[in-house]
Image (cartoon, rainbow, N blue to C red):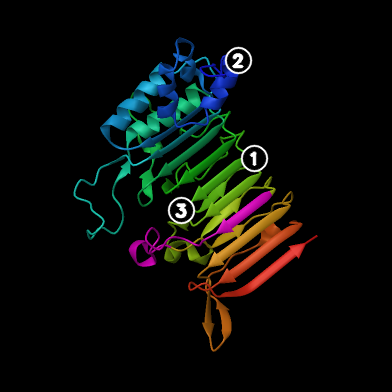
Amino acid sequence: MSGRDLFGALQDDLIQHVLSFLPSREAVKSATLARRWRHLWRSTPAVRVNGSGEKFRLFVNSLLLHRDGASPLHSFEIEANLLVGGEDFDEFSDYEFDPREVDPHVDLWIRHAVWTCRARSLVARFQDSPVMWWPQNRQSSAFPHRQQPFASPHLTTMHLHRVQLHHDHLLDFSPCRALLNLTLSECILDGDALLSPWLERLSIIGCGTGIHPSKHGPMGMRIATPRLRHLQLSDDYDEDCFSRDMYDYTDLSSSLESMPLLTSASIQLIGTTTFDDDHATAERPLLLHGLAEATSLELIASTEDGRVCQILLLQA
């Protein structure tokens, strides 16, 4: 069996499926294995890129340029440290917030993946503190009605990590008519509502809101997802990213509107409660009107030091 080509009997689409589990840089290197493999990476159903700096920009630009546009793209995953602006910014400066924004290349890559290649799954992670991503503001006279990058009829799953989402468009996911699964982790949700008539599964983990209580009251963000079946809320946020003193924002105090199809919900709110003479007192409201129909419900409230003081478990 020495020297036998174990992949020789496999069809191209099966090899491309295997390559799709690799980081794209490794998948491209497979072109050197044999003549047959020279172009297989161009049609893999997944693009997975991770990096920073000019070499990373050049690699991703070349990767997307040479990819076979006729081949379906099921998944686009990017983990990047590409920011622009705030040239004088450093983590020890006196800025009240991180003034940097997502590099326009990232916006273009995601637009290409979602719109041109019709990706069905999008994962975008950023390595620094939550950065501003306001692609709807990048309009010009040549593109006065440019679509937001996520408003795709093909996207079914999306995960955003450490992004500050602007309230004008990005919290309204209604244009994403195929979007069923949405995960937001360690994000700043700069809007008074998260809207989607199509979502079936929603996870909001370690996020904060850009809603100042003096302007909007204690309710924070409203969540309107009438077709939701599974809900996860947790505000066990990273203090380095969501310092109350730094942002002066409210935490994820929310109003949950009616969710008649909801079957399971897990709500974990840390720092919502304080102890005074061994008595627990809630500090932040969570209006749970939308959970009435849930057949499986878990509610946990605890102090910031991890002491759990309120637990409710319901199982129909």
310 shown above or below 80:
below
Dot 3 or dot 1: first in sequence order is 3
Cα gap from disc 3 to disc 1, whole angstroms: 23 Å
Outermost residue toward the top in this view = 35
> Which of the image's four quarters has the C terminus?
bottom right
Local secondary structure at mark 2: loop
Q: Indicate the position of residue 312 as horizontal and vertical percent values.
A: 69, 69
Crowding around mark 3 (Cα neighbors within 10 Å: few <14, some 14 to 19, many 20+) is: many
State which quadrant residue 112 falls in. Answer: top left
CB atoms at circles 3 and 2 under 8 Å apart?
Answer: no
Residue type, mark 2 in image: Gln
Q: Which residue is mark 2?
A: 11
Asked if residue 242 is among those painted magenta in the image, a careful observer would answer: yes
Q: Indicate the position of residue 247 as horizontal and vertical percent values.
A: 36, 61
- Looking at the image, is mark 2 or mark 1 nearer the viewer? 2
The answer to which of 64 and 282 lies nearer the viewer is 64
The answer to which of 52 and 165 lies nearer the viewer is 52
Q: Which residue is mark 1?
A: 198
- Looking at the image, is mark 3 or mark 2 nearer the viewer? 2
Q: Which residue is mark 3?
A: 186
Residue type, mark 1 in image: Trp
Residue drawn at (42%, 47%), measured in percent from left and top? 163
